[in-house]
Image (tube, rainbow, N blue to C red):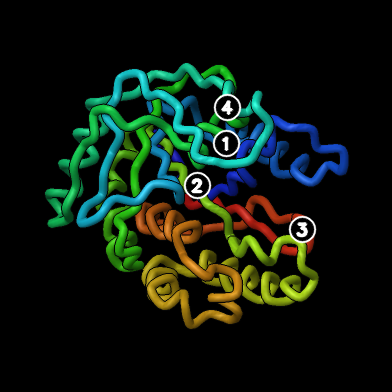
Amino acid sequence: MLQPAFYIPHGGGPCFFMEDPNGIWAGMAAFLRNLQSRLPERPSAILIVSGHWETPGCFTFGGSPRPELVYDYYGFPNHTYRLGYDVRGDPELAKRAARLLHKAGLPAEVDPERGLDHGAFVPLKVAFPDADVPVVEMALEQSLDPELHLAAGRALAPLREEGVLILASGMSFHNLRGFSDARFAAPSRNFDRWLAESVALEPALRSQRLRMWSAAPSARLSHPREEHLLPIHVAAGAAEGIGECVYHEKIMKTVISGFMFS
């Protein structure tokens, strides 16, 4: 059965596994916990595109049968570096994904040793706590070219028909200076409004807008560097239906959204 594709927020570092007396991350955690309820059936595997992994010159897929965790966050409590997520990888899916990209004329390779960074294991640990669905992580191509990532999504679209859930993991607003700064409230809303409007367009128009994302209102204030946005291009490229906003919340001073593509 055809699985949807999602662009999900992954929060700040290991935020869901720390004390949160003000409930900053409670709504986002609830959204991730309920993610499975939006699926037509249990996925055969998960392909997760993380804003925390880039490789130069090609797209890379993690091909480890038992991916270790990459604790690529800094300055957090000691226990967050002992978090576990004992999930199986899927080396055959990694190879299949790379072949699909090759067929589309896109550079791709498989890294048999790469583990799961926090852009992958942190949201997965909330959304799929039983770790019972095999996971393959996909890197962004380091040029961060929007069209290249839309094309990668289009090439990977057949995986959805095979029951693979495509998760694009980033943050719809990602300016670390801005989260706690009230001056960024309006820019985050402006960009979020543009993003929601773009996602809801039919695919050709949606792709056209996403290619030109940097011309959107407050684009560079929301994403000084676009690695946390580009995963949405992969999810959008993999979808023939329109997208819809399925999560929307003010986090500290700025707006964060998540989207589902049919």
Q: Is residue 93 above or below residue 255?
A: above
* Disc assigned to residue 250: 3
* Disc assigned to residue 123: 1
Amino acid at circle 4: Tyr
Judge by depth and name the residue closer to the eye, 1 or 171.
171
Check contact, mark 4 vs mark 2: CB within 8 A.
no
Query: Residue at coordinates 55% horizontally, 41% vertically from top-left?
Result: 73
Determine the secondary structure under disc 3.
strand
Q: Picture coordinates of residue 151 (x, y %)?
A: 27, 60
* Disc assigned to residue 169: 2
Marked residue nearer the N-terminal end (1 or 2): 1
* Disc assigned to residue 81: 4
Amino acid at circle 1: Pro
Q: Name the image quarter holding residue 129.
A: top right
Q: Residues within 10 Å of mark 1 (few under 14, many from 20)?
A: many
Q: Picture coordinates of residue 188 (x, y %)?
A: 67, 70
Query: Residue at coordinates 25% horizontally, 55% vertically from top-left?
Result: 56
- Closer to us: mark 4 or mark 2? 4
- How far separated are the C-alphas under marks 2 and 3? 18 Å
Query: Residue at coordinates 54% horizontally, 65% vertically from top-left?
Result: 200
Q: Is residue 217 above or below residue 121?
A: below
Marked residue nearer the N-terminal end (2 or 3): 2
Q: Quadrant of the N terminus?
A: top left
Q: Name the image quarter holding residue 64.
A: top left
Marked residue nearer the N-terminal end (4 or 1): 4
Marked residue nearer the N-terminal end (4 or 3): 4
Judge by depth and name the residue closer to the eye, 18 or 150.
18
Determine the secondary structure under disc 4.
helix
Query: Residue at coordinates 28% horizontally, 43% vertically from top-left?
Result: 158
- How far separated are the C-alphas under marks 1 and 3? 18 Å
Check contact, mark 4 vs mark 3: CB within 8 A.
no
Check contact, mark 2 vs mark 3: CB within 8 A.
no
